[in-house]
Image (cartoon, rainbow, N blue to C red):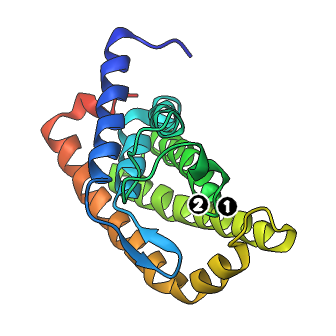
Amino acid sequence: MKLELRDYSRIGIFVGIIAVLGLIPKFTFGAIPFSVQVLGVMLAGAVLGSYRGTLAVLLFEVLVLAGLPLLTGGRGGLQVFFGPTFGFLIGWLVAAWVIGLLVENLKKVHVAVSAAIGFVLAIGIWWALGLGYMYLGAQYNLFADAKATLAMTLPAFGVVALSDFIKAALAVVVLVGVKAAYPKALNN
């Protein structure tokens, strides 16, 4: 897919939104940081579409990889990609793509319904990838604190998953507002 000139600025805006949402102080449940950045990931996929939304998340993650402390709690650098939460970062990419794909292809359905379906599916995807990676890390000692991380994460799963559904509901409200205020924003 070819990007138009306006796509670069739209992608950059969502990279900035995801980064700014990381400035909200970190709360930790178990080993998983409660991050509002997921809201930016969801909105990137829903507003920009599957291709551009995934590019925005990928660009954000490249900046984190380069060492910029853009993740919640000021985390950044190569160590983030070798830590126990790496699966969640991969999940963000897949989630943005899935959300965008559903919003693009369910245009006959109300945008809020298609986005809600996409958000719920995306939450399942990034949790599966995140916890799957933690489980593999614990089984194969991929990182030093894998077993402790997994042991702390599973009891907190319900609380953090519930917070993700609250963020998804907020994302639907924001998306409906964007569609009402500027309908062209969703023409992917």
Rendered residue at 72%/63% (across/down): 133
User: Along the line of sight, which residue is nearer the eye, 173 or 22?
Assistant: 22
Q: Residue at x 51, y 82 (%)?
A: 30
- The residues tagged by marks 2 and 1 sit, at their Cα atoms, a distance apart of 5 Å
Q: Quadrant of residue 113?
A: bottom left
Residue drawn 59% across and 43% down?
78
- Residue shown at 34% from the left, 66% from the top: 167
Instruction: Specify the quadrant of the image occupied by residue 65.
Output: top right
Q: Position of residue 47 (x, y in %)?
A: 35, 39
Q: Which residue is mark 1?
A: 129
**Residue 173 as seen in the image, left or right of residue 38:** left
Q: Is residue 27 left or right of residue 157?
A: left
**Which one is in front, 22 or 144?**
144
Q: Are marks 2 and 1 in contact (CB under 8 Å)?
A: yes
Residue 41 in sight: yes
- Which label sits on residue 147? none
Q: Residues within 10 Å of mark 1 (few under 14, many from 20)?
A: many
In this view, 93 is above or below 122 = above
Q: Which mark is residue 126?
A: 2
Which quadrant would the N terminus be assigned to in this image? top right
Picture layout, residue 12 above or below residue 37: above
113 relative to 146, above or below: above
Query: Which amino acid lies under the numbered mark 2 shown in the image of this protein?
Result: Trp
Which residue is most to the left? 181
Question: What secondary structure is found at the residue carrying circle 2?
Answer: helix
Give the residue type at disc 1: Leu
65 sits left or right of 46 in the view: right
